[in-house]
Image (spheres, rainbow, N blue to C red):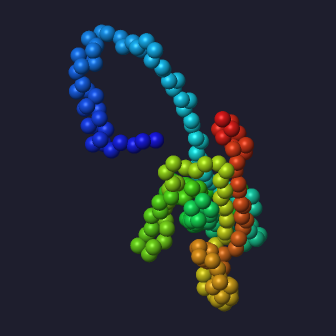
């Protein structure tokens, strides 16, 4: 697709508007006719490429970790986008019990493809958005859910030692936190139904 800057487009538009009708051999009200022997090219069919964005809505607690009477869970998610090799951590949802639903903030409502991010004064990513234009199918993403156990104590020293060899991005979670579950998802046009098949 050819793109014109505002200046070039304005100049082009001005040139077209400035062309006198008489210079074209037409008078007001005349209908242009195709000269005899001229070949008329058929318009090419428009090609529509479907692109996608994955936006999380909520999390639902089927069953909180441990015994229900022992206290509520503090839950957060990590989204991993292989197409951009990026990962982000959501806010922590407090007081999550069995059958509770929590909704993701609009400022964190993109799972893939991850785009521009916003950080706080300490450099922690607190908001992000999907990359403009989306992505083609097939595409993949990963979701991890963690239960935050806080920090401090002897156990945290043991777990921190285990995290020292983690790959970049893995330490977005605290070493004390428990993995509740994870899912690697790959979606192809056939999985996306009529939206991806046409």
| Nearest to the observer: residue 127 or residue 141 | 141
Q: Is residue 65 left or right of residue 49?
A: right
Write down the quadrant of residue 34 in the picture.
top left
| Nearest to the observer: residue 20 or residue 86 | 20
Identify the residue shown where x is 25% and y is 32%.
14
Residue 135 x, y percent position in the rendering: 58, 50
Residue 9 x, y percent position in the rendering: 31, 38
Residue 67: in sight, yes or no? yes
> In this rendering, is residue 171 above or below 110?
below
Identify the residue shown where x is 70% and y is 54%.
186
Residue 196 x, y percent position in the rendering: 66, 40
Identify the residue shown where x is 30% and y is 9%.
29
Q: Is residue 96 left or right of residue 134?
A: right
Q: In this view, does 24 lie to the left or right of 53?
A: left
Point out the image quarter for the C terminus: top right
Residue 95: in sight, yes or no? no
Residue 70 x, y percent position in the rendering: 72, 72
Number of numbered callouts drawn? 0
Write down the quadrant of residue 143 in the picture.
bottom right
| Nearest to the observer: residue 72 or residue 136 | 136
């Amino acid at each position: 697709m050819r793109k014109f800057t505002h200046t070039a487009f304005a100049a082009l538009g001005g040139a077209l508007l400035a062309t006198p009708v008489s210079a074209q051999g037409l008078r007001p009200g005349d209908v242009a006719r195709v000269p005899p022997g001229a070949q008329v090219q058929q318009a090419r069919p428009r090609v529509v490429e479907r692109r996608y964005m994955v936006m999380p809505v909520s999390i639902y607690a089927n069953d909180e970790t441990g015994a229900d009477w022992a206290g509520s869970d503090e839950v957060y998610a990590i989204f991993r986008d292989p197409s951009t090799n990026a990962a982000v951590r959501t806010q922590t949802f407090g007081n999550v019990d069995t059958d509770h639903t929590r909704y993701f903030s609009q400022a964190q409502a993109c799972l893939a493809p991850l785009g521009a991010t916003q950080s706080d004064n300490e450099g922690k990513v607190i908001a992000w958005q999907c990359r403009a234009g989306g992505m083609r199918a097939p595409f993949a993403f990963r979701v991890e859910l963690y239960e935050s156990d806080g920090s401090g104590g002897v156990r945290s020293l043991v777990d921190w030692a285990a995290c020292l060899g983690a790959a970049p991005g893995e330490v977005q979670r605290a070493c004390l936190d428990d993995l509740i579950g994870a899912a690697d998802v790959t979606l192809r046009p056939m999985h996306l139904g009529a939206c991806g098949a046409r």
